[in-house]
Amino acid sequence: MMTDYFSVDIPVFVPSYDKKKLYGWSRYKDDLWDLLKDTTGGYCMYCYDAVWINGQRRGQIEHGIEKANSPEYLTDCVPNLGLACENCNGKYKRRGEKARQLPKEQIREFESVSSRKYACRKPCERYIKLRCEYVRRGNIILQPFESKIHENGNVLKLRYDLLEGKYVPGDCKDGYSKKEIGIIEGHIRLFGLNSPERRNREVGRYCKNVIDHHDLMEDMLYYNLVVNLLRDKLQKLPIDDAVKICKVIYSRALLQRIT
């Protein structure tokens, strides 16, 4: 199968927790922040913009399922804690928060299992079930770990179309259902990923640098994960071919005014 150099798949972030450490939101937050930063490469789990800039934190530990649904159990549920930029956590994710609130009977079922506060290393079955319902009701893709609308369902993923300069639903082996497509597209709308104010301009900037310098700019930092994903693909090519691809992407970015 030929590699598609004009799109990149957004990965599922899976933290590798240190068994010798404890993690949480109320306590042990610094170690968790460092771990999530390493897991994502220092990018927001929702918009993929940098949250680690010039050695400084620009992001926040955030609750995938809002802790208000179950303050005692979700506040320090380690698999429920992700890394987000201030815009995503403080502005965009607040939209529709009340509509995503989970039914009390489902919360009670989740709470009936004993909590391993600060020491949990993977999503338990009851958290996964609660998370699936939250994703289904809220039209949102949570990270870290996989997002599905039922336990045996398809993993919901995004893709970035480099020619169109926008996020689209990713590929799925058996094809996404209409509901699954709706959730992915709802997630894109919720965080305004394709809106004029949030359009990804780092890709155009990167491609222009590759063209001007005839180099993949491996030592230069960019403020969006998509650039890293593109650069990883281009590393498989001779530099002349990589420059040709960047010229195509950059010319499209100019037409769409997202440089």
Image (spheres, grey):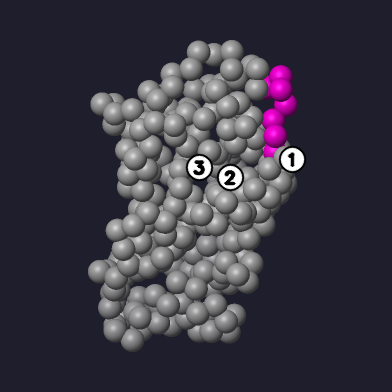
- Residue 218 position, x and y percent, is 27, 69
Left or right: 223 with respect to 66? left
181 in magenta: no
Left or right: 173 with respect to 18? right
- Residue 56 position, x and y percent, is 34, 57
Which residue matches tag 3? 62
Q: Amino acid at mark 2?
A: Ile
Residue at the front extreme?
26
- What residue do we see at 63% from left, 45% from top? 140
- What residue do we see at 31% from left, 63% from top? 54
Q: Secondary structure at mark 2?
A: loop
- Residue 175 position, x and y percent, is 62, 46
101 in magenta: yes
How far separated are the C-alphas under marks 1 and 2? 15 Å
Which residue matches tag 1? 99
Give the quarter of the image for residue 70: top right
